[in-house]
Image (tube, rainbow, N blue to C red):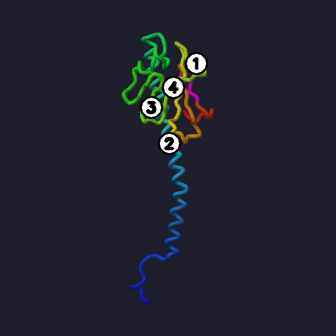
């Protein structure tokens, strides 16, 4: 055989290249997914801070916090247009989290604790390091599980 007829790759060379690509993908894809989930927490943290600020403005004017009830719904809060409010929930700007009032401890006219929980059908639901984030009227931040990875 002369060298003019020998062009292309051998099967071994193709298999080695495929193996290298598979190894790199096995490392890169989980790392990427983990980073996108961590980045998605920003949506929940931002929504919590925005709703807490709106709660404080509401308290300044009305002398009570919005409790997500018919008398004081979340729709009464002065929220930015990117947050969607119903009577008792607020959806974050990117839609990854739902903000509600924590029932334990129960909110009162002078206290609240907001809870951000991931929307089940979206990628944040796979975040095992932060299944919910909480922020209260004093600015205390915590999460579940209690490992401080949420904030």
Number of marks present in the image shown: 4
* Structural crowding at the residue carrying mark 3, measured as other residues with C-alpha within 10 Å and reported as few (<14), some (14–19) or many (≥20): many
Query: Magenta residues?
Result: 138-142
Q: Give the farthest residue toward the right.
A: 146
In the rendered structure, which disc, 3 or 2, sits on the residue that comes first in sequence? 3
**Mark 1 = which residue?**
106
On screen, residue 26 above or below 16: above
* Type of secondary structure dominating the magenta stretch: loop
| Image quadrant in which you'd find residue 53 | top left
4 shown above or below 17 = below
Dot 4 or dot 1: first in sequence order is 4
Number of the label disc, if any, that sits on residue 92? 3
Which residue is rendered at x = 50% and y = 42% of the image? Answer: 123
Alpha-carbon neighbours of circle 4 within 10 Å: few (<14), some, or many (≥20)?
many
Check residue 100 in the rendering and tell me which mark sits there, or answer none. 4
**Residue hosting label 2:** 123
Q: Is residue 151 magenta?
A: no
Marks 3 and 2 sit apart, C-alpha to C-alpha, by 14 Å
Marks 3 and 4, how far apart at CA: 11 Å
Q: Where is residue 71 drawn, in percent x and y?
A: 46, 14
**Residue name at image x 44 percent, y 15 percent:** 58
Q: Earlier in the sequence, mark 3 or mark 4?
A: 3
For label 2, the SS is helix
């Amino acid at each position: 055989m002369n060298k003019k007829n020998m062009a292309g790759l051998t099967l071994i060379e193709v298999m080695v290249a495929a193996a290298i690509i598979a190894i790199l993908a096995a490392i890169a894809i989980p790392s990427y997914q983990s980073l996108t989930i961590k980045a998605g927490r920003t949506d929940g943290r931002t929504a919590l801070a925005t709703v807490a600020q709106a709660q404080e403005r509401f308290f300044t004017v009305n002398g009570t916090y919005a409790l997500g009830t018919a008398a004081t719904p979340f729709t009464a809060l002065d929220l930015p247009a990117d947050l969607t409010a119903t009577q008792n929930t607020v959806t974050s700007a990117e839609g990854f989290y739902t903000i509600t009032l924590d029932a334990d401890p129960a909110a009162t006219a002078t206290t609240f604790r907001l809870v951000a929980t991931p929307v089940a059908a979206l990628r944040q639901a796979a975040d095992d390091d932060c299944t919910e984030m909480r922020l209260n009227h004093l600015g205390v931040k915590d999460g579940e599980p209690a490992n401080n990875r949420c904030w």
